[in-house]
Image: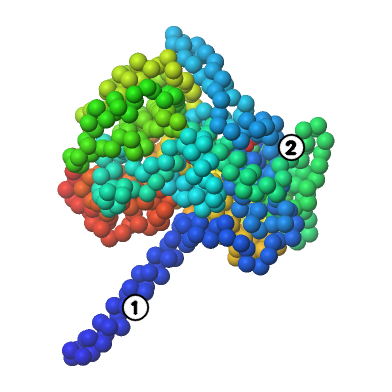
Amino acid sequence: MDFPTLVTALLVLFPAWLLGKRALRSWAMRTFTAVPDLQRAGTPRKYGRVAGTAVVCGGSIGGLFAARLCADHFERVVVVEPESWTFTPEARAPPVDNIAEVVKDDATYKTIKHKRTRVYQYTSIHGYQTLLLDTLRQLFSDFEDVAQSFGAFIAPADPYALLNGKHLWPTAWAQYGDAGLPNTIQCSRRTLEPMLRKLVSTSRPEIEYVQGTVTDYVLGDGGSIRAVVLRDADGASQKVECALAVDCTGVAQIGFKLLSRALPNILPSDIREQYNPQMNYSTFDFPAIPGFNDALRAMNIPRPDGGKYLDVEKLSAFFIYQPDPTVEHRSLVFMRRENGGVMILAGGWASEMPVTVDELRDFVSKLKNLDRVPKHVFPLLDIFKEYEHTATVSESRINSCSRLHYARAAKVLPRNFVALGDSHMRMNPRFGEGTTKAALSALTLDGVLRDLSPQDPSFGATFFKRLDSRTGQVWDGVKYADYGHVATTPASGESLTDGKFARWFNGKLYAAVETSPATSSALWHVGQFIAPPLDLFAPAVLRAILRETVWPSS
Ligand SMILES: Cc1cc2nc3c(=O)[nH]c(=O)nc-3n(C[C@H](O)[C@H](O)[C@H](O)COP(=O)(O)OP(=O)(O)OC[C@H]3O[C@@H](n4cnc5c(N)ncnc54)[C@H](O)[C@@H]3O)c2cc1C
């Protein structure tokens, strides 16, 4: 090739390569994340509102996000929720704790009594990702003021996290320099839900709330749900005609039960996948401890990469220990919550559940890779011991994770039926992803509503296909990690040897986080739901995995 031809070829090929790379990135973001939908969310619908009513079944996290977004698309939005307490002013205000005493074996501890009886995890520790905060900011113009009035803590999502004993944080952080990593919100679940309810009710006062239990769907012509039937607070049956039925009934997964009844012998038998990770853990909840930040500062917590001391006031989590279940069954999280409080998670696969600080200390001392546990963890335990009398504890057992593969029933599902949040997928909460996933699913619904009318025969199928691309890998990743622990009962037709490659790959990713900035950055961004999981297969990450395979680090 002569020189001018080479120059011409380069002039054509280089921009083509750049354009191709950009197109691939845009496709990956569109397909595997909800970030492009987030950018459009909250803006007016192009072609006017859809005639009729969107009926949102369930008024918790998924239902509230769905209702807020549907209000941009439909003439009328109705939320059906059975729990009477959610209709009180208390359910839109910061929580007021009622405490009760529990006696367990030879230990006594205090726990929070609340009125949210249908949400099992109401007092369990909740962590959230960047996408959740971004969604709250995009949808609610008064978010910062409301979050402040609920005492929520907003700070870089930079958990001082150990993945199998390796620090995730420093290399991902280095990418953002002094600005720190993008922010997340930290607050307990019993603060997040009332805060979201307040944000939705003030920003969209036209949304109607009906107290009732959804009991049936009335099917209409042309493969649709014509009406949602509910039993109201007086026990009477009511029918609400609907243009769209959104199932947000959480673990009750009412949509699936009603469709199975309405379409007997028509739904494929492999829609519902379920397994049991036997995940048990305790949540310790400390209200603000006097002088806590000063005590933390005095600990001179070093950056894990040996740099200057951490700015403890901006630290959202003091310690996260996420193990590989083939090696260790114990997980630990120490993190901030609203109003200066601290929450702790201690537990894991078929794990013991500490309910006193002495038991917690014993639990920490049994961790494998104990030499990698940061030095500040033990003085923190001393502080927690001193303030144990102020703490409450709650115990959680997660013995059923399930995913509804609605895309497998695309041909027979009513076109205007969608399900999101836990009614579509209830994951092992060890990475704390359920709430962000509910927001992601509602954003996905918003995106589909901007492209299609619910009268379109492909509406529901399009929604479930997009949702599967964005949540399927999260499900598989968590499930196959769970299969690494012998106590897990696998899904029907599977065995604990399934997902061997995924576990091997994950082990190598974790092993590479301290030495490969590309790997820690990809893990961090994918984990925050703001980058596609495809990034975990980027050339620099694959090189790090190859290096770990040939020359494993200690
Ligand atoms: C122990 C535990 C810890 C968790 N930790 C985290 C965490 O750290 N971070 C995180 O993000 N997520 C976590 N999760 C998951 C998170 O709590 C859920 O993903 C989230 O609550 C899902 O919201 P949802 O609206 O889909 O369902 P839910 O919050 O379960 O709400 C379902 C709603 O449906 C209503 N309902 C039920 N039946 C009917 C009916 N027949 N008709 C109408 N309405 C009905 C209920 O009253 C309720 O309001 C955890 C879960 C558990 C179990």
Q: Residue at x 33, y 48 (%)?
A: 181
| Tag 2 near tag 1, CB within 8 Å | no
Check mark 2 vs ligand 1: CB closer than 8 Å? yes or no: yes
Residue at horizontal 68 percent and vertical 65 percent from the top: 48
Left or right relative to 144: residue 354: left
Please tell me how crowded label 1 is: few (under 14), some (14-19), or many (20+) other residues with Cα within 10 Å.
few
Residue at left offset 40%, top offset 16%: 388
The amino acid marked with disc number 2 is: Gly
Query: What residue lies at 69% left-to-right and 38% top-to-bottom?
Result: 81
Q: Nearer the viewer, residue 351 or 93?
A: 93
Identify the amino acid type marked 1: Ala
Quadrant of the rendering where the C terminus is positioned = top left
Q: Is residue 6 above or below residue 466?
A: below
For label 1, the residue is 16
Distance from the alpha carbon under mark 2 to that under mark 1: 57 Å
Residue 160 percent across, percent down from the top left: 30, 38
Q: Which mark is residue 466?
A: none
Question: Which element type, helix, strand or loop, lies under badge 1?
Answer: helix
**x%, y% of residue 367?**
29, 27
Residue reaching furthest top? 106
Horizontal arrangement in the rendering, residue 35 relative to residue 444 (left or right): left
Circle 2: element type: strand
Image label count: 2
Q: Which residue is mark 2?
A: 212
Answer with the quarter of the image where residue 356 lies: top left
Residue 234 in view of the camera? yes
Quadrant where the N terminus sits is: bottom left
Residue 467 versus residue 113 in the image, above or below = below
Q: Give the farthest residue toward the right.
A: 236
Residue 253 in view, yes or no? no
Ligand 1 quarter of the rendering: top right
